[in-house]
Image (cartoon, helix red, strand yellow):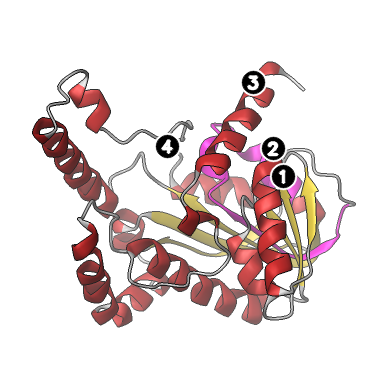
Amino acid sequence: MDNNREELKNKWNKFWGEADKIILEGETKNNNSWYALSWEMGYEYWKEVFDKYSPGKKMLEVGAGVAKISYYIAGLGYDCTMLDNSSKALDVAKANFNNAGLKGTFVIGNAEGMPFESNTFDLLYSGGLLNYFDDVHPFIEEMSRVLKPGGLFSATIITSKKFSCQTLGDIQIFLSRLLMNIIKGKFKDIIKNSRRNFPFYENSIKLKEYKKILDKCGINVMVSTGANPFPAIALPKILRPVYAGFMKVLMPFWKWFDRSNSKFTEIWGISYNIYGIKRV
């Protein structure tokens, strides 16, 4: 294993070791937050896609992290295998499965060289993985390899480097942190310390580029669209349920947005949702 890969693995282990409890929990028990509502909408969206297009229930989640999607899908009767290079993340995922009485297979490995036979899985999902690499072709090619012909490829891809509604949210977060640092008298490196501080590189690949790569790797793309029309923002704890209530009122719009497959959603959405069928 090269130094860069080892360093990246260590960073992810550190990230999962220090993550907030709500991120680590299998269930989103309290839906009075942007985070929990975003997951709930994602669960509903992907359940619809999986139930409609997957030829079977043998699923692989690549770059699973703490495996929230697999946790939910396993509860619906799917046979879930989860792969990640972080032992910390998979330990949390395994504990969540055990606590819920769910069965799953947990594999430590790298997404560009997975320890599975070709044509193994009916369904493959990858959430928040491809956006961390400049060259995503080897990863998608490997995902296509382990997917059965006629199997369903699906992915959620974070889009923080392009303009979206989260761009406006990030401005609000920055201004809120800046104000708090001023109030607390923390003036040293105040601009730097008020900015979003995410420790991982993120690419700027456009949706049309992902579609081209998927086609080259044998995936017929059915849908490629933006998802989630509401940004994460910084709010005092007392106001978070108010923002959640606003989003709940607009839930029908949110559902329409995630399923409209339009240029508007591609531009405004926080992430991309993309899925297709492996050619026979």
Quick one: SS at disc 1? helix
Structural distance between the alpha carbons of marks 2 and 4: 17 Å
Residue type of the residue flagged with mark 3 = Asn
Quick one: SS at disc 2? helix
- Say if mark 2 contacts mark 1, CB within 8 Å: yes
Identify the mark nearer the N-term, 2 or 3.
3
Residue type of the residue flagged with mark 2 = Pro
Between 86 and 222, which is closer to the camera in this rendering? Answer: 86
Residue type of the residue flagged with mark 4 = Ser
Q: Which residue lies under the disc numbered 4?
A: 204
Where is residue 228 drawn, in percent x and y? 36, 63
Between 224 and 10, which is closer to the camera in this rendering? Answer: 10
Structural distance between the alpha carbons of marks 2 and 1: 5 Å
Task: Judge depth for marks 2 and 3 and give the one in front.
Answer: 3
Residue type of the residue flagged with mark 1 = Glu
Between 119 and 16, which is closer to the camera in this rendering? Answer: 16
Asked whether 137 falls inside the magenta stretch, the response is yes
Q: Which residue lies under the disc numbered 1?
A: 141
Residue 135 image-quadrant placement: top right
Task: Judge depth for marks 3 and 1 and give the one in front.
Answer: 3
Quick one: SS at disc 3? helix
Residue 138's label in the rendered image is: 2
Structural distance between the alpha carbons of marks 1 and 4: 19 Å
Tell me, yes or no, if residue 113 can be seen here: yes
Structural distance between the alpha carbons of marks 3 and 4: 20 Å
